[in-house]
Amino acid sequence: MARKKIYTRAGDDGTTGLFYGGRVGKDSALPRAYGAVDEAQAILGLARAESGKGTELDDILVHIMRDLWVLMAELATLPENRHKLVAGKSLVTAEMVTKLENMIDDLDEKFTPPAEFVVPGENKVAALLDVGRTVARRAERHSIAAAPAPSQACPYLNRLSDLLWTIARWQEGKSLPVKSIE
């Protein structure tokens, strides 16, 4: 049995196929939005690889990355096909947003918030999470055109960036003290 090839050549004309059908230009609102989410997911994968398997952070990041599949499915669907999406499987729900808020509240108890602006790079994991946060913000901006209200895509991405900021600060608290250069 021949193995299916990863390439299809269907996108060589500058278009891409969408979930539940249809094609759009690769530079249109939907691919911009889900592409930024895909980029955020990849960066979170780097943070996960650095955090170590089986850690509390690993569990949190896997949960988020699975949510991002749901978000990408929604963003990769034409408006006229969104009625086919399934809540929590291919459509972001208000409950998913609330779960992020609860995670933020729980993590807030694990560190003292910084009193000043944060200079990223306290450790590698926190720095990767900060990059993920900025990409999530970009995805949020792109999602405004790709999934307008009542979609929960933008609220989800907004909370995700807050959560990633919170996780990064929590991870900075786990850094070993270093000697100051002052």
Image: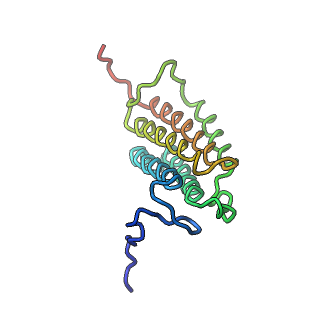
Q: Give coordinates of residue 128: x percent, y percent.
A: 41, 40
Q: Residue at position x 68%, y 43% from top?
A: 98
State the scheme by which the image is colored: rainbow
- 161 lies left or right of 125: right
x, y percent for residue 86: 67, 62
Pick whichever, 75 or 68, lies toward us.
Answer: 75
- Give the left or right position of residue 177, taking residue 141 as reference: left
Q: In this rendering, is residue 57 above or below 16?
A: above
Give the image quarter of residue 127: top left
* Residue drawn 62% across the image and 36% down it: 106
Q: Nearer the viewer, residue 15 or 58?
A: 15
Position of the C terminus by quadrant: top left
Q: Camera-side residue: 119 or 136?
A: 136
Whether residue 137 is situated above or below residue 95 in the rendered picture? above
What residue do we see at 59% from left, 45% from top?
144
Q: Position of residue 18 (x, y in %)?
A: 53, 64
Quadrant of the snapshot with the N terminus: bottom left
Residue at the farthest top position = 182
Residue 89 to residue 65: above or below? below
Query: Residue 124: horizontal and vertical position, in percent?
Result: 37, 37
**Measuring 55% from the left and 49% from the top, which residue is drawn there?**
64
